[in-house]
Amino acid sequence: MDSNLIIILVIVIVVMTAVVYIFTTRAKNENGDGLINKETATTMQLQAYERLLILVDRIALPNVITRVNQPASSAREMQMLLIQSIRSEYDYNITQQIYVTVEAWNAVKNLKEQNLLIINQLANVLPPNATGLDLNKLLLEFLMNDKKGSLHEVVSEVLSYEAKKLMG
């Protein structure tokens, strides 16, 4: 047999094995009427809250600043890096909204929007020759002096509370 045919056969076997596994696993998680059982649904919800807690931590401004810090960049470049990081984290987790309450999802969405607004507003007050370091320092000073800076902590508490209600 030629090597291309062997590779194709191996791929077909792997795919078929995966399909069989998925269907048998799903059948175990469903009851007789095709609905997911309560325990599985609760587990899925808890996992969603866990992911959203990670998201909230990752888009908290101090953490975003630390993660994408490039002090040699311009303030505008830093602004774009911060915004891009927050948006990509949010977009990556957007499907979690189907597992959590509307209030929980709105809290996460509001945190994202508030962080973007803070970044944009503070970047706009800096002079055109400001550096990324200047923007980061301004953002951190704002966070230390304004209660809006700790919104991520409030959102984390809301998510934790809702997750604990599911367990309880």
Image (spheres, rainbow, N blue to C red):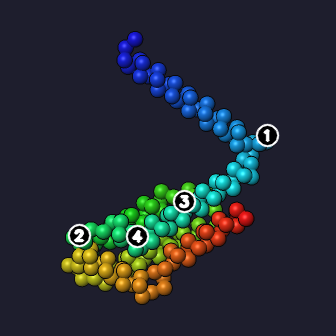
Identify the element where label 1 is drawn.
loop
- Residue positioned 53% across, 73% down in the render: 110
Between discs 4 and 3, the one toward the N terminus: 3
Q: Nearer the viewer, mark 3 or mark 2?
A: 3
The residue lying furthest to the front in this view is: 168
Q: Is residue 122 visible?
A: no
Callouts 1 and 3 close, C-beta under 8 Å: no
Q: Which residue bears the numbered disc 1?
A: 32
The answer for how far apart the CA atoms under marks 2 and 4 are is: 18 Å
Between discs 2 and 4, the one toward the N terminus: 4
Q: What amino acid is at disc 1?
A: Gly
Between discs 1 and 3, the one toward the N terminus: 1
Q: Which residue bears the numbered disc 3?
A: 51
- Residue positioned 42% across, 60% down in the render: 88
Q: Nearer the viewer, mark 2 or mark 4?
A: 4
Q: Which residue bears the numbered disc 4?
A: 63
- Residue positioned 47% across, 59% down in the render: 91
Q: Is residue 4 left or right of residue 48?
A: left
Q: Which residue bears the numbered disc 2?
A: 73
